[in-house]
Image (cartoon, coloured by chain):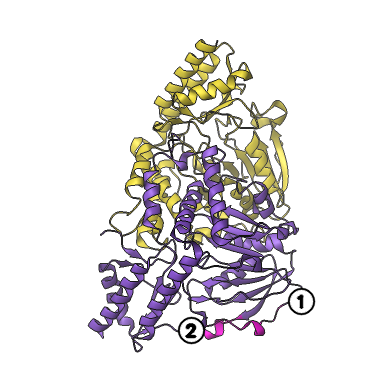
Chain colours: A yellow, B purple
Amino acid sequence: MSRAFNFSAGPATLPESVLRQAQDEMLEWRGSGASIVEHSHRGPEFIQVAAEAEADLRTLMSIPEDYAVLFLSGGATTQQALIPLNFAAAGQTADYVVTGHWGKTAIKQAKPYVAVNTVASSEAGGFRDIPARGEWQLSKDAAYVHITANETIHGVEFRDTPDTGDVPLVADFSSSIASEPVDVSKYGVIYAGAQKNLGPVGITVVIVRRDLLERAGQNRADIFNYASHLKGESMLNTPPTWNWYMLGLNMKWMLAEGGVAEFARRNAEKAALLYSVIDGSGGYYRNEVAAAVRSRMNVPFFLHDEALDKPFLSEAKAAGLMALKGHRALGGMRASIYNAMPVEGVKALADFMKDFQQRHG
Amino acid sequence: MSRAFNFSAGPATLPESVLRQAQDEMLEWRGSGASIVEHSHRGPEFIQVAAEAEADLRTLMSIPEDYAVLFLSGGATTQQALIPLNFAAAGQTADYVVTGHWGKTAIKQAKPYVAVNTVASSEAGGFRDIPARGEWQLSKDAAYVHITANETIHGVEFRDTPDTGDVPLVADFSSSIASEPVDVSKYGVIYAGAQKNLGPVGITVVIVRRDLLERAGQNRADIFNYASHLKGESMLNTPPTWNWYMLGLNMKWMLAEGGVAEFARRNAEKAALLYSVIDGSGGYYRNEVAAAVRSRMNVPFFLHDEALDKPFLSEAKAAGLMALKGHRALGGMRASIYNAMPVEGVKALADFMKDFQQRHG
């Protein structure tokens, strides 16, 4: 087959122009005698690539100067362990709001290091809603409050930024970073694996208010110390250079396309289109998330009869629509429609869904 | 310029055929509708890539069945923190042999977690030799003994495997893994960032005797637990899939070229050629490492007059020989001649060095 519309939840689809540039430059980067993947991270070629990627990300997300940006390995899960190690004293309380699978993962990684207080959870309701801010039982002296901005599996997304007062808000933005304008100054820490909305797998972005890096945190190795990573310009050890380079190409593509305002517009259009097909199907397709917090990035849905799952997936694949199978925790289907998924792809999926319903209705 | 002979210490040169295959497959992997960098790590396409890479590495290095192989992110430095967390009780003693810069780094990362006993160090002599096994002051109940198989900066390499009896030997093999046949069964743990001898940057290999994974270790997040990584087949979280894929391509290339026996032959030839030019230069070039432990991978050398460093580097670059500048800790020059550096490249460097000496003698 040729390139399909790829609805994978992550690693996810990349812009074809980014892949083509990486392809063109694979054997030699800009007349430098070597591929970027072969250059020393300390050499002028990669230093330039890294600096441009940071500058472009700062422009794209309007990151204030009093925020540091780290480019790390280890994915979001590693950050979920590093956050308490860096920002909480041993055994101090940290508040967690749980709105899906990844909120639970964040707690799992943090538990060895902090007293986790689950201040709100929508688990009893099957993670189909977000507990109202007024119901959160915040601790008096929490080190931070942790939320998952978008739940990739359950398809639940915060549509506003909760006010946590003087307690820093820490947010896992892995599956919605840079998908719309966000006021970074309302957060203490924003972290995200890059493989959904920022481009390539294998690199993680941590945006952190600089004063938080002065916290003592806990006994830990230097490689687990965010302040050391900042001092080392995210090159405390050899960083994943190719992945960083790909992130940089993706930043330039996003800026050229019109920045986060334009992606917010496209993402809203894509999500509205898909949910309207689901809601207009008379129960043939079903999404059970409360309308106000439905994710613009991950749309889980179920067919009215499980027996149709297999033909749906195989016919979709034949139509050039791939990776629609839902996460094993939920079953059913899931369409992940991140920044790099064109409106055209979602239109093709919407048309396919309507057609499938007619043929199998 | 076109592709140069690239002597970078890491990230380092890759086989051109591997880069060409990655280039060919960048937009779509084997008719699957997407690039491998866009495929879910849970999908059949990447599962196959990952499994083949492990099988090929096992074949290449003759890794026994009672050893697990993990493919992780975070580089060797992260493993230097995870090793005490996984294999030592809090505050237990661990023995470290220091033969260069990276041995010191290993201690730095381990110190928050274990009582480090430096059983031998060649630092007083400028890291130009390896203290004889008979002089090591091993602890009675050490959790493990740590060595650096090859010191990338100082150019010092163990040419045999020290016998540490029942205490597991843990070795940082970042800059010499798979460069010659090694009896894996003599080690408890072998770890290596891939970006020197295994191919791409951004992925790290940990080869560990399975019984060691039963040790309780210390309080730590699940993502810092090697046993959890093994249970999750190195997909406890999203792994650096593209980097893993590139490692796999590199494994197939190494096997096709004749495996570690053939690379041992080539590496010996390359090192002998370079050291003979240095030693035969009448002091024009200088390498001060004891002959018996000179590295086959990293050849640091000095010109007799520092003022010649700049012309040496610029003329080398013009001759298509790049990244020869020494590490800032030592100065001078360094030629890194890993598996993917062809004999032809070292011959070109040797010829250039002789010619440079004649012209600037």
On whether residue B128 falls in the magenta region, the answer is: yes
**Quadrant for the C terminus of chain A in the image:** top right
Q: Is residue A270 left or right of residue B318?
A: right
Q: Amino acid at mark 1?
A: Lys
Q: Which residue is mark 1?
A: B140
Query: Which residue extends farthest left?
Result: B359
The answer for which chain carries disc 1 is B
Q: Nearer the viewer, mark 1 or mark 2?
A: 2
Counting residues from the N terminus, which is met first, the one under dot 1 or under dot 2?
A: 1
Q: Position of residue A233 (x, y in %)?
A: 47, 59
Q: Is residue B278 left or right of residue A8?
A: left
On whether residue A202 falls in the magenta region, the answer is: no
Q: Element under label 1?
A: loop
User: Looking at the picture, do discs 1 and 2 lie on one chain?
Assistant: yes
| A44 to A146, vertically: above or below | below
Label of residue B291 in the image = 2
Q: Would residue B222 be seen by someone viewing this image from the given angle?
A: yes
